[in-house]
Amino acid sequence: MAPSGNAALWTSSSGRFTVGPAPVPQPGPGELVVRAEAVAVNPVDAVSGLLRHVVYPKLRYRTVIGSDVAGTVLAVGPGVERFQAGDRVLGYAAGQEQHRNSAAEGAFQHQVLLLERLTTPVPQDLATEQAAVLPLAVSTAAAGLFEPDQLGLPLPTADPVDRGQVVLVWGASTSVGANAVQLARAAGYAVIGTASPRNHAFVRSLGAEAVFDYRDDGAARRIVEALADRQLAGTLAFGQGSLTRTLPIVRAATGSGRLASAYPTPATTIRARLERRHGVHVTAIWGGRPTESEVGPAIYRDFLPEALRSGGYQATPTASVVGTGLSAIPDALAELRAGVSARKLVVTLP
Ligand SMILES: NC(=O)c1ccc[n+]([C@@H]2O[C@H](COP(=O)([O-])OP(=O)(O)OC[C@H]3O[C@@H](n4cnc5c(N)ncnc54)[C@H](OP(=O)(O)O)[C@@H]3O)[C@@H](O)[C@H]2O)c1
């Protein structure tokens, strides 16, 4: 049955938000429409002014932004066999990607069009608001670890072989980092992370063998020591200053020499050129890349459903429900700008 009635948090080109009616999305081939019951906010949703146009230069306004959705399937399009109306799912809302550029696919509305290839069933024992923390964080972590032009590591499995190498996740208590720790473990790598001391136990609980304080000036030396004679399969750099802090480690370690940074800025490109002479290959991650690549379905179709169902993968970090209704989202973005630690801000849409 086709869904009826929709409302959205519209974003203007100047970044102003207004709640209003929105067209009812109709699912095409490979698409589904979901009643969003919980959405999470991300740093990229909180950027405004000129920076928004730098991050999304081609996005057509007015539009609906937001990437993280969990809710219930209302309708499926032709060729969608994994889901049916009534299923609880989480998914990556791809509307801001250049190849989609579609308000119907923004998370911040009651009825969201999702791509089947970026949607995962939510197991019975996982709360909808907790499920909403995953999509952008998982996609970005997976892009950094598995896209061939990033770290290019083998994909995660339920029963990984021990590869005898290490992945460094600098900023492991960020939403993206916490998911990167788990994905790297599921790909067969030992993980060393950095976080504030209050989050060391959290990062260890995700599978990291050692965690260091990123504010400690000696962290780089300690990490190189902790590698012992093992190779560094790759490094992920999350958080302010992370590229500068991780470069000396990659230079000192043996291994792939690959370093993927979550800051896709001109600064990263310049650093990448400078680092080539040291044998370090620096790349900038785009969390939306799996919307088009094989990494998307490898994670959302092949890995996450069973990993979440079995409890082998945690929906992390912890959701903090900070409001209810579309009009609560701008306040959630303001709270996010003030900073969070090992938690994800979620708004419920009852
Ligand atoms: N390129 C892309 O496509 C893409 C996509 C998603 C996110 N990102 C970027 O990736 C980063 C992480 O995003 P997120 O949503 O995961 O962030 P988040 O969860 O909101 O980040 C909060 C965490 O940042 C950690 N942190 C703060 N300063 C740090 C530093 N200097 N070094 C390392 N960690 C630090 C804090 O750790 P403690 O509390 O332990 O101190 C805190 O837990 C952001 O910069 C975001 O803009 C990029």
Image: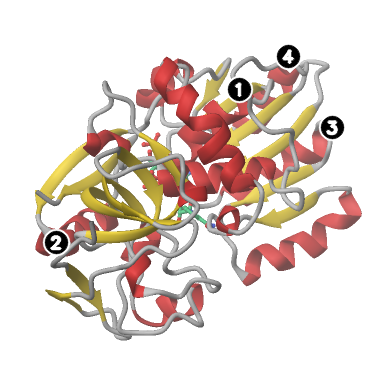
For the point 32% across and 64% down, which residue is it? 46
Circles 3, 1 touching at the beta carbon (< 8 Å) = no
Corner quadrant of residue 314: top left
Quarter holding the N terminus is bottom left
Which label's residue is closer to the chain start, 3 or 1?
1
Determine the CA span between mark 2 and mark 1: 36 Å
Give the amino acid at mark 2.
Leu
Determine the CA span between mark 3 and mark 1: 17 Å
Q: Callout 2: helix, strand or loop?
A: helix
Give the amino acid at mark 1.
Arg
How far across and down, in percent of the image, does residue 28 sit? Answer: 43, 65
Determine the CA span between mark 1 and mark 4: 9 Å
Mark whose residue sits in front, 2 or 1: 2
Q: Which residue in the protein does label 2 denote?
A: 326
Corner quadrant of residue 188: top right
Circles 1, 4 touching at the beta carbon (< 8 Å) = no
Quick check: 45 above or below 231? Answer: below
Give the amino acid at mark 3.
Gly
Which label's residue is closer to the chain start, 2 or 4?
4
Quick check: 57 above or below 207? Answer: below
Circles 2, 1 touching at the beta carbon (< 8 Å) = no
Q: Which residue in the protein does label 3 denote?
A: 255
Mark whose residue sits in front, 2 or 3: 2
Q: Is residue 35 left or right of residue 288?
A: left
Disc marking residue 185: 1
Q: Callout 4: helix, strand or loop?
A: loop
Disc marking residue 162: 4
Disc marking residue 31: none
Could one spot residue 170 in this view of the protein?
Answer: no
Q: Callout 1: helix, strand or loop?
A: helix
Q: Callout 3: helix, strand or loop?
A: loop
